[in-house]
Image (cartoon, rainbow, N blue to C red):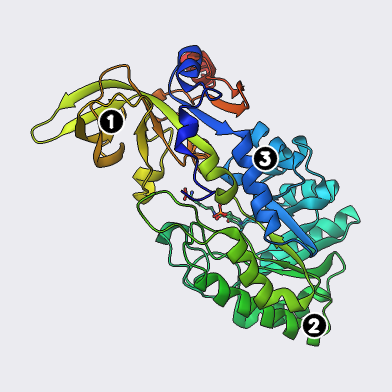
Amino acid sequence: MDSFAYRHHKLHAEDFPLERMAQEIGTPFYCYSTETLIRHHSVFCEAFTDRDFLLCYAVKANTNQAVIKTLADQGAGADVVSEGELRRALKAGIPADKIVYSGVAKTKREMAYALEKGIFQFNVESEPELYQLNDVASRLGKVAAIAFRINPDVDAKTHAKIATGRAENKFGVPLKRARAIYADAAKLPGIRVQGVDLHIGSQLTDLAPFEQAFHIAGKLVEDLRRDGHDITVLDLGGGLGIPYDQTETAPPLPHLYGQMAQRIVGHLGCKIICEPGRLLVGNAGILVSEVIYVKKGEDRNFLIIDAAMNDLIRPSLYEAYHEIVALEETGANPVTYDIVGPVCETGDTFAQGRTLPELATGDLVAIRSAGAYGAVMASTYNTRRLIPEVLVKGDSYAVIRPRPDYEDIIGLDVLPDWLD
Ligand SMILES: Cc1ncc(COP(=O)(O)O)c(C=O)c1O
Ligand SMILES: N[C@@H](CCCC[NH3+])C(=O)O
């Protein structure tokens, strides 16, 4: 098993008391490992040693305040896409000058907030956004440091819903118009052009699309410098994939990604920014759930667990594979199950045809690789409560986000007088 997998034996290690946690907290819950977060952060940074490098954790992957703080304490910056994420990153202690702001639809309010905080860079994705940022900055007497996110029209060879670098995707400015757009930006008093940015998609399992995109970005940096722009920053985005299925070949490790990046763009002497999200947190988290019923269908066994699509939507939304393991290795006979949740949709299925030791009501299972795009994409569908998030450090754990009371969900609705 490679160093990026959330090590299975950890589930049973004495210092990782999942069964006790389940009793104390109740299921389902997310559990994150401090040790794994720190290891992933350092492995990624080591891939870019000896150069001006900033890791900006894409906080959208997991916005748990303790997770962000753990990475902030390691020196991570942040990639944010909303005022909420910016507030979270600042609250976790990430200095504004280590924060980049991505996203296709930054509002005036969000721009003003980020300018007031003095973030390192706006990654601008369109001309209208450029002009609006110039207006907001000028009004505040500020100058916004920017990179344009370019759309290199590269196929990231990942799930269509998370590929972002093709011409038909909404992201970035078209490469063909990039030089003209940079020329326009250079004339604006509220704007200081400093970089080039890209992000071609998520869960990439092959280096080739990255390499293609980095070539394009590198060539653009050279062209822009020839046009007279002082380009000092190259933001390569995130997207490096993680192993979800241990039976498949693992995606390339960060040191290979780093070597490739340095080979393609190292000579430019730019400050390199990377925005990994999933890679840092994905395999640092699991979702622990309890079996409610085992139900015999016409031709299959359903393992009905207390977690559902509203807690972890990736299998329903992307047909994503997550390994599911029994917490106790009982040695019971293997049984093949469809593993489903309680929500009233057929899509509330975590896995089909999985073989596990025979399980019964009350047994615990862990859904692995659930640290990225898990809790952050949760909803209260079926009026289910958001589930607790727990951080483990050594032999202790802390509930970072407790399970809310039902009244805290239901009481959010304020009835008008005429219904009172
Ligand atoms: C602009 C940007 N940067 C970084 C990321 C992080 O991607 P990943 O979690 O795949 O590393 C994303 C999400 O895909 C993104 O949209
Ligand atoms: N939500 C996606 C990743 C999206 C990346 C965001 N830019 C997933 O679970 O795989």
Q: For mark 1, give the secondary structure.
A: loop
Q: Which mark is residue 84?
A: 3
Frontmost residue, 320 versus 171: 320
Density class for disc 1 (Cα within 10 Å; few <14, some 14-19, many ≥20) is few
Density class for disc 2 (Cα within 10 Å; few <14, some 14-19, many ≥20) is few
Q: Which mark is residue 225?
A: 2
Q: For mark 2, give the secondary structure.
A: helix
**Of all residues shown, which one is farthest toward the right?**
141
User: Quick check: 22 left or right of 362?
Assistant: right
* Image spot of residue 137 (x, y percent): 83, 57
Q: CA distance from mark 2 to mark 1?
A: 57 Å
Check disc 2 and give the amino acid type: Arg
Q: For mark 3, give the secondary structure.
A: helix
Residue denoted by label 1: 344
Looking at marks 3 and 2 on the same chain, the residue that comes earlier in the sequence is marked by 3
User: Quick check: 221 left or right of 248?
Assistant: right
